[in-house]
Amino acid sequence: MTEHMTPWHRRARAIAMAVTAAMALAGCAGQLPDAYESEYIASVGNLTTQNRALREIPPPKHRVIVSVYDFPDLTGQYRERENVQSVSRAVTQGGAPILIGALQDAGNRRWFTVLDRSNLEALVRERTIVTEMRRQYRGETTVDPSALAPLAHAGIILQGGIIGYDTNTMTGGAGARYLGIGADRKWKLDVVTVSLRAVSTATGEVLANVVVRKPLASFADRGSVFSYVALDELLEVEVGRASNEPRQIAVQQAIEKAVMALIAEGTEAGIWGFESDAEGQQYLAGYRTQLYDGEVPASANNRGRPMTTNPAATVQTRPREMPRVSERALTPAAPGTPSAGAQSPIALPPIGAQPDETVG
């Protein structure tokens, strides 16, 4: 076919190839700044509906001190890849930071005082450095409490984890095509499950326990045209769009919902309470309706309570008062008591064998 091309066609083809190559190079050069700047900027907003509901919980009577050690991924699942073995986990491994953030968001930081124990080794190591430095440079055998106060401790430990991630629990789709023109949609649902419980530090009793399941929706839309517009001219067009709900956001919403449910369970168990009884009863009524799918049994209003009494109460460690150096130096000694600077007589060892000793 090239032999039958006229000089004008050859020239037009060469021009088209040159323009195409120049546009490709220009496109590559124009994309370099996009690697650092784009229209999608970092943001602290984009609060989900679940997070807003968590922040709008009515205030409690008193803030509760809780500690968080870990919130691990207990599923053991890896991310699915077609024909490729993946070492990436199916769900996020940052459960503890998400739980700590959810506890602080509860009622806009009015419900819980959170003690982060997820990296306790680093905290203890830093305190050891302070203790050692003051011993070396100040000669302190006992650290001054004003320089290093005792660690706070909680009466309740929050435990749990991501206990399930089920893929393709539901799949489906629909489509239509006529004379080479059509469109279709495919969708699937995954489910992530988290568990959260409150454990008493004093007795080890499980005070309250909740399980929350969060579906993840993914769908793909596609449209295409495949038709002859002339005897020897074929038109082919495809367009599509896919949307996958982020798994980290789904886990975050499930943990936030678990915190809301744990507040309701703890209120029913007498662990903590709301500042307003009316708001508390309204919150519990909404929780029971959702828990029992609208059919609340009569027994739900008279549930048992834990064995541990007043588990949220915590007596914090108070350091002993240390007398000042000036006070110790100026305090007069009692009569007959040797002064601090006086040397006590040194007892000499006995001479010879004692009655209870054997020499040989």
Image: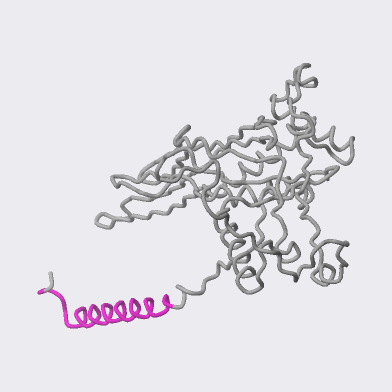
Color scheme of the displayed model: one colour
Q: Which residue is found at the position 62% from the left and 43% from the top?
A: 255
Residue 307 percent across, percent down from the top left? 74, 25
Q: Main secondary structure of the magenta part?
A: helix
Q: Nearer the viewer, residue 230 or 18?
A: 18
Q: Is residue 171 shown above or below 36? A: above
Q: Is residue 127 above or below residue 198?
A: below
Q: Is residue 26 magenta?
A: yes
Q: Residue at x 60, y 71 (%)?
A: 136
Q: Residue at x 81, y 64 (%)?
A: 323
Task: Where is residue 60? Give x, y as percent.
Answer: 83, 43
Q: Nearer the viewer, residue 86 or 343?
A: 343
Q: Is residue 271 magenta?
A: no
On screen, residue 195 above or below 223: above
For the N terminus, give its image quadrant. bottom left
Residue at the extreme top: 298
Q: Nearer the viewer, residue 244 or 17?
A: 244
Q: Position of residue 272 (x, y in %)?
A: 80, 37
Q: Quadrant of residue 122?
A: bottom right
**In this picture, residue 232 sits left or right of residue 298:** left
Residue most extreme to the left: 3
Total labels drawn: 0
The C terminus lies in quadrant: top left
Q: Which residues are magenta?
A: 3-32
Task: Answer left or right for 231 relative to 263.
Answer: left
The image shows residue 330 at horizontal and vertical percentages of: 86, 71
Taking the image as shown, residue 238 lies to the left or right of residue 274, namely left
